[in-house]
Amino acid sequence: MSNIMPDLPTYAPITCQPWCQYGDGHTSEEPGDQMCSGIERRVPLYLTEMTNGACPGEEPRWAHDFLTVYPEKLFGREPTLFLGRGELPGASLTLDEARQVATELLFAVTQIEEQL
């Protein structure tokens, strides 16, 4: 009896974005699921309680929660930015929405700093 695995299907490559961390055309993903994603950036949230990121039965891995952001582009759609918190589901933002969030964050920081 042979243990030869069948070849996985491959699909036509897409043209990856210059910032795509893989740049391989995503030929192993089905059309419609082919997506470029950039490098994830994390911001630790030091004011939150530390969480254990270990699986059951593993040694505890304590770490601060974090915000994460990275560019993404699903084939056939406009690029978006993914914004998430830790391992929780996040949100994909249009570039205009991402600019608005950034503007509002900076506005709030400025309000506080002006009073210091």
Image (tube, rainbow, N blue to C red):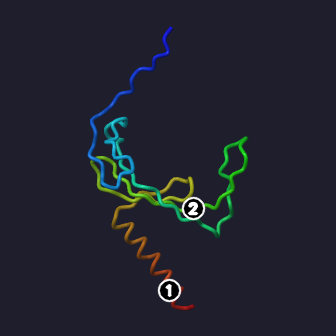
- State left or right for residue 115 relative to residue 15: right
Q: Which residue type carries mark 1? A: Gln
Judge whether 24 appears above or below 116 on screen: above
**Residue at mark 2:** 66
Q: Looking at the image, which residue is at 39% across and 66% down?
A: 98
Q: Looking at the image, which residue is at 55% across and 54% down?
A: 88
Judge whether 61 appears above or below 99 on screen: above
- State left or right for residue 99 relative to residue 53: left
Badge count = 2
Where's residue 68, x and y in %?
A: 50, 60
Where's residue 111, x and y in %?
A: 50, 86
- State left or right for residue 58 relative to residue 89: right
Residue contact at pointers 1 and 2, CB within 8 angstroms = no
Chain-order first, disc 1 or disc 2: 2
Residue furthest to the top = 1
Q: Which residue type carries mark 2? A: Phe
**Residue at mark 1:** 111
Q: Nearer the viewer, mark 1 or mark 2?
A: 2
Mark 2 element type:
strand
Residue furthest to the bottom = 115
Spatial CA span between label 1 and label 2: 24 Å
